Amino acid sequence: MPHSTTLITTIAVSLGLALIMGMIAHRLKLPVLVGYLAAGMIIGPATPGFDIDMALSNQLAEIGVILLMFGVGLHFSLNDLLAVRKIAIPGAIAQIVVATTLGASVAYAWDWSIGAGIVFGLALSVASTVVLLRALEHRGLLTSINGKIAIGWLIVEDMVVVLALVLLPALSGWLATDTQTPSPHTHLDLLFALGAILGKVSVFIGFMLVIGKRMFPWLLWYVASTKSHELFILCVVAVAVGIAYSAALLFDVSLALGAFFSGMVMRESHLSHRAAQESLPLRDAFSVLFFVSVGMLFEPSILLEAPLQVLIVVIIIMFGKSLTALILILAFRYPLTTALTVSVSLAQIGELSFILASLGYSLGLLPDKGYSLIMAGAFITITLNPLVFQTAEPIRNWIHSRSRLARMVERPNDPLAELPPAISSEAVTDHIVIVGYGAVGKRVSSMLAQRGAPMVIVDQNRETVEQLRRQGMHAVAGDAASPAVLIQAHIARASVLVITASDPIRVRQMVETSRILNPRNEVLISTYSEEEALLLQKEPIGTVFLEEQELARNIVNQALKKLHAEDNPS
């Protein structure tokens, strides 16, 4: 009996070609996301050959959006944001405003509508979570303060996207108009529409925070108690898709917003980490279908028909918003390393921009050309992002080689960059300098404080330094790879330097500075990466402690101590 195989054909061709193009991109040392987008272009209607059902592909992409936003909600950490709130919140909002204004301004110059300009500008202002996390992880910066600021910055961008997903459908009728002033009647209709959608969203959010926050973590725990791996994964996916669909059906909330909040409430469960890990393969598979679907809508001819407009889009993404972030972070008196790391991290756009562009396109706000320009900007900036990342270190070294320029851009007259003059010389003589106040640095300093050992803590997070000083501890804000920072920590009179940073290059710079200023100083280095430990142990720069190895050693010592006690009872 004949039957339709359209769904199977769409999935098979999309995943198969995405695999091939992803492997090619990886071989070329490009993000695999570039390969997925290229696969979509190849099988899309703009190129001859394959004939894929676009309507069906778009529905599969919707599942990808649901699982992507579910993952964003599942990883949304209010604590991570609060830890860097003083820089991430104002910085991200200011950067979004500047980038959106730049995008909307060029859209206005191209005679687009108000709505098209706003959607276009917003899409250019938000970076890809997937690209940024993979870039930070690849460079070992995920747990560093620079990585945390970049992630906190992205969390704020995620929240802005969520707000846009709520407001755009309600504002679409007004934003689709030309630049003429709307009538009072239109204003009234707009207020009613906004009030209705915000009311429904408020009811939905209230339901999720009051009932969902209790019910869904309990459901996850209950299903986990069955010890069935299949049921657990099914529960996670059913909650993600079911809440998204129910939110759209009952509250007129977008599928993406419903999925985001389902992830947020699921995070309240102690099993959230397991839920994230075990749903990852399915989420990645449908995310691939989403990126392929996005690539299908791209018109490659835009590169030949409007090269100047494509160049303007790339400049806004790679220079406009990145330069804004660089200036803002330096204005908040953070080190140049932090400013460069965050700014190069943001020099691309990705899935959040696609979601915004797809919504704007479906609402009739964004023209075909606008969608293609966003796609072209994403394709080019994601491709170039690894190269942009590699420029951060040479730029930092070039600026630091020019002392006058370095003093001008880094923390001028910053009270946190040096110890208060009231500190006695005894407190900073034969003391311990601890670089990094993360998990290891915090435990080391706490144990030393209990023994009354004098110490100075160096950390790049200004909020951490402010908090330490309020607690009466000696702390300096800055990047310890810079000699000026270690000088302010009085490394020349210290007896021990404890380094908990994860970047081997920066560790070497710290040790070199320490050796020059204090050759007798003992250097202790903590790392969680076996690869980094091997690299550091090849050079005589100090004693290297691998965290997992030290943990195993302590466990073995404790076990042997117990065994010895049983063999020799008193």
Image: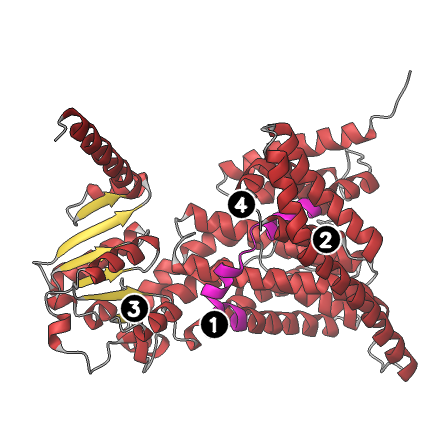
Q: Which residue range is magenta in the image? A: 65-91
Q: CA distance from mark 1 to mark 2?
A: 29 Å
Q: Earlier in the sequence, mark 1 or mark 2?
A: 1
Q: CA distance from mark 2 to mark 4?
A: 21 Å
Which secondary structure lies at badge 1? Answer: helix
Residue 257: which quarter of the image? bottom right
Front disc: 3 or 1? 1
Instruction: Give the numbered dot on residue 270.
Output: 4
Q: CA distance from mark 1 to mark 4?
A: 29 Å
The residue tagged 2 is 258
Residue type at numbered disc 4: His
Marks 1 and 2 in Cβ contact (< 8 Å): no
The residue tagged 1 is 86
User: Viewed as shown, does residue 189 lie left or right of 356?
Assistant: right
Which secondary structure lies at badge 2? Answer: helix
Front disc: 2 or 3? 2
Marks 3 and 1 in Cβ contact (< 8 Å): no
Residue that appears at 68% across and 39% down: 237
- Residue 208 lies in the magenta-colored region: no
The residue tagged 3 is 400
